[in-house]
Amino acid sequence: MKLKQLSVFLENKPGALSAPCRLLAKNNINIQTFALADTREFGILRLIVEDTDKARRLLQRHGFAVKVTEVVALEVLDQPGGLATILDALDGSGINVEYAYAFTAKSQGRCLLVFRFDDPDGALKILKARKITTVGSDELAKRLTP
Amino acid sequence: MNKNHEPPAFHPASALDYLPLSQLRDLQFARLKDMVQRAYDHVALFRQRMDERKLKPTDLRTIEDIVKLPYTTKLDLRDTYPFGLLASPLKDIVRFHASSGTTGKPIVVAYTQDDIADWTRAMVRSFAACGVHAGDIVQNAYGYGLFTGGLGAHYGAEALGASVVPISGGNTDRQIMIMKDFGVTVICCTPSYFLHLMDRAGELGVDLKELPLRTGVFGAEPWTENMRERIEAGSGIKAYDIYGLSEIVGPGVAMECVHQAGPHIFEDMFYPEIIDPKTHEPLPDGTEGELVLTTLCKRAMPMIRYRTRDITALEPARCACGRTLRRIRRIGRRSDDMLIIRGVNLYPSQIEAALLKVEGTLPHYQIVVDRQRGLDTLEVQVEVTNEALGDTVGALEQLQKRLAHSIESVTGLRPEVKLVAPRTLQRSEGKAKRVLDKRIL
């Protein structure tokens, strides 16, 4: 089960990050989680939101360059070795983790991580075989609703 | 697909495009003599310059004698601002236009009623040459006002019998809505604005290929063959190059026919020459140099051998359309846009061509030249697009590298490429500002 992530191009200058966030806020779109990658010149804001299409259209209409990427949300035990379990599963498969970040919400001693793999479908097959739980967008919405 | 790319019916206004050469030369000479006489009688600057050369209007015996006449430059228009080059009394002037003039005073041009009628005829012939016809719906997105583009295209399209939407420039979302709702078939604007419009239509989910729009009349800035390919592939329309400049009349000095093989100059109205921009020697057809134009009909403000600064060549071969009018090669550069960076000549069009070779980027760019510790620096800022955007830092750095490599292979100069957010580079009047030279030379 894959999730859609939005990547927004930002120039590395004061105020660049707040502009898209304010726009989403004004349109009542909640950011479920995000990560920021940056270099000296530019940054990429990666967002998981509930209505990806609506957010993408909104951002593009306001002049942001936006790309949609498929990522995978995985449940891991919140204990030593939790992350290693996933990486062990993929060991030797040739699948590369391009980047990863986390959801802040935890439930029943488990936390959620977002992974971008170079081969998301290949990764899913392996992870399923190892009984690692993936979380789709509906389940995600349920878990994040207080 | 709703587009109709059928070959156009012949328009009677185009008959002059096919005048036998001997008749065309006779007509040019007769008009030249009358125009030079008017200029000599009424414009102090022209009279003074001809007197200095001991030249009288009656000394002109054939059209070739045009080379005896003195050149006119943009500086002459500035020096005589605003009315010093008028050959008609102010009471006969019905219209002024002016250049945008980013520094100091603008360049002013004037028209009598007959001049407006001539300009309209040139624009009718321009539209007819690329198959625009009565019944077309023409969205005129050139700026209306002091700029000649808007009103020039407007009068021509109306006289042709088309239905004109005088929308002027800007407000892209409304442009796209009207294009779709009105079933617009022809658009007039700068090529860089059309690329922006294509990009925006994509974002709004409007497929230009599905609209009746079939023809673009693009001008007012230099563009490249790559840009034409990108426009045609992305929108399904045919893109035609129109050439003109305010000092001569505005748009409609030259226009491409359906063969898209370079604009035909309406030579019976605008006499072309090519000269060496350094030595000022006339050059033969087929040789690249600076385009010099003489207005053969203008009354309010005749121009004798005006140096356009545009670098091109007169195509010696006859076009497949059979017009006797000579064609100019696509103008990719101007003699005054040339930058010299670390001793290397650079034209902005070279940067554009290099950027267009890289997939997924649009030619919205700005060249920033500076000098640090005595060394010229070249920075090229490029707006990223949804298509070109990667979602990792590595992918964006790759894109920067590909762009830098492409620029280096075209120009021989290694640039610093900076990616910037969409629509952050300055645009003015639909013409993109391409060069920022911060060097204090």
Image: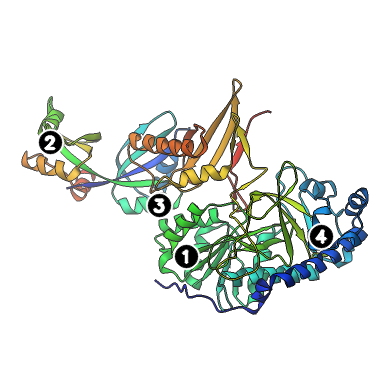
Amino acid type indicated by mark 4: Pro
Marks 4 and 2: CB-CB under 8 Å? no
Marks 1 and 2: CB-CB under 8 Å? no
Residue A55: percent from left, percent from top: 35, 50
Residue under label 4: B302
Work out how far the residue at label 3 is from the one at label 2, CA to CA, in angstroms: 38 Å
Residue under label 3: A58
Above or below, B223 against B24 in this view is above
Front disc: 1 or 4: 4
Residue under label 1: B237
Front disc: 1 or 2: 1
The chain carrying label 4 is B
Mark 1 secondary-structure assignment: loop
Mark 2 secondary-structure assignment: loop
Marks 3, 2 in one chain: yes
Front disc: 3 or 2: 2
In which quadrant will I find the C terminus of chain B?
Answer: top right
Work out how far the residue at label 1 is from the one at label 3, CA to CA, in angstroms: 28 Å
Residue B248 placement: quadrant: bottom right
